[in-house]
Image: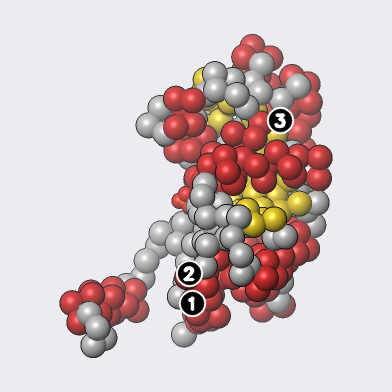
Amino acid sequence: MDADPQLHTLVSEEMSRQRQTLEMIASENFAPVSVLQAQGSILTNKYSEGYPGRRYYGGCAHIDEIERLAIDRARKLFSADHANVQPHSGAQANAAAFGALMKPGDTVMGLALSHGGHLSHGTTMNASGTFYKAVRYHLDSDTGLVNLETVARLARQHRPRVIVAGWTAYPRTVDWAGFRHTADEVGAFLVADMAHLAGLIAAGVYPSPVPYADVVTSTTHKTLGGARGGLVLCRGSLADRIDAAVFPGHQGGALNQSIAAKAATFHLAGRPGFVGSSRFVVNDPAVAGIHATVLAALVSRIRVR
Ligand SMILES: *Cc1c(COP(=O)(O)O)cnc(C)c1O
C-alpha cells in the first residue's frame, strides 16, 4: 500500500468490482485463500528450469518437494499415470501436447471455434493453426450436438495425427469412448481438453477422459476453481515426450508459486465440500440450461464469502 499507492488503488478497485458484480463468465472462478497465498508467495524468487531431481539450478530441494506434491496430487485426483504441472496456462498445455505428438505440418482435427472450440485447437490466429494443418469439425446443425459419424468421416478423409475432444462452449456430455474409437480407427492420438470440465471431473460428477485419451490437457482456474495455470496428464508411455515438450520445448523456468498454488487447488478439489458443490452444479434442475461453469463459479463464490 505504501510502496505503490497508485497500484494499490487499482487493485482495491478491482476487488470492489469483483465483490459487487455478479459475473456470469463461464471460464472464471474465485480462488480460495490458500491458493492466493501460494501464488503470491516468495516461491516466485526461485529459478528451477528442469524437473524435480534434475534441475539446471542449485537450491531446488524444497521446490522439488513442492512440485512432487503437486504432481502426486494431480495424479491421484484424476487417476492419471503421469502429470506435468508446469504449463503456464491452458493454451500452453495444448501447445506442449501438440508439440509432443506432432511435427510441423501434421494434421490436427478440432471443433471449429465458432461452434464452441478453443483458439488453441487449430485456429488460424493461433500458432496451432499455423504450425499444423488444421481440419475443423462442426456441430450438427439439426441437433446442435457433436455428431461422431461426421467426425469419423472427416477423420477417415484427412487422417489426422491428433484429434481433439473437449471444448470451451459445449454444456453436454462428451462421448470420450466414441472419440477413442475414431482415433483408433484412423491411428490418431486423442487429446482431451478438459479445461472447462476439470472441476466436475475431479469431483466425479462428469465422465473422465483419462481412461480414453492419450493426453489430457486442462486449466486449473475454471471449474477446478484454483490457481491460474495449465496441466497435462498422459499415459506413462508418453511421459518423457510430454515433459520434454513442456520444458524445454515450449517454456523456460517453472512458475513455482503457481505450481504450489496448483498443489493447493488439487488438495481442495479432493475434499468433500468440493464434491458436494460440484454435485449441486450438475444436479439442480433449476439451473438446467445454465452453463455448468457459470454455476460452479457462483457456488465457489458463495463458499468463499
Ligand atoms: C480456456 C480454455 C483453454 C485455454 O486456457 P488459458 O489458460 O486461457 O490459456 C484451452 N482449452 C479450452 C477448451 C478452454 O476452454
CA distance for labels 2 and 3: 35 Å
Could you tell me which residue is drawn at 49 percent across and 76 percent down? 42
Give the crowd class for mark 1: few <14, some 14-19, many >=20 residues within 10 Å: some
According to the picture, the residue beneath numbered tag 2 turns out to be 44
According to the picture, the residue beneath numbered tag 3 turns out to be 189
Residue 208 visible within the image: no
Q: Are marks 2 and 3 in contact (CB under 8 Å)?
A: no
Could you tell me which residue is drawn at 44 percent across and 32 percent down? 127
Q: Nearer the viewer, mark 3 or mark 1?
A: 1
According to the picture, the residue beneath numbered tag 1 turns out to be 41
Instruction: Give x and y (percent) for residue 146.
Output: 60, 33
Could you tell me which residue is drawn at 53 percent across and 76 percent down? 38
Front position in the image: 251 or 149: 251
Image quarter of residue 269: bottom right
Q: What residue type is disc 1 on?
A: Ser
Q: What residue type is disc 3 on?
A: Phe
Q: Are marks 3 and 1 in contact (CB under 8 Å)?
A: no
CA distance for labels 3 and 1: 38 Å
Question: Which comes before the other along the chain, label 3 or label 1?
Answer: 1
Q: What residue type is disc 2 on?
A: Thr
Regarding mark 2 in the picture, which secondary structure is present there? helix
Instruction: Give x and y (percent) for residue 297.
Output: 49, 67
Regarding mark 3 in the picture, which secondary structure is present there? strand
Front position in the image: 295 or 244: 244
Color theme of the render: secondary structure
Instruction: Give x and y (percent) for residue 153.
Output: 66, 17
User: Does 79 appear above or below 192?
Assistant: below
Image quarter of residue 240: top right
Q: Residue furthest bottom?
A: 2
Residue 139 as seen in the image, left or right of residue 277: left
User: Does 196 appear above or below 112?
Assistant: below
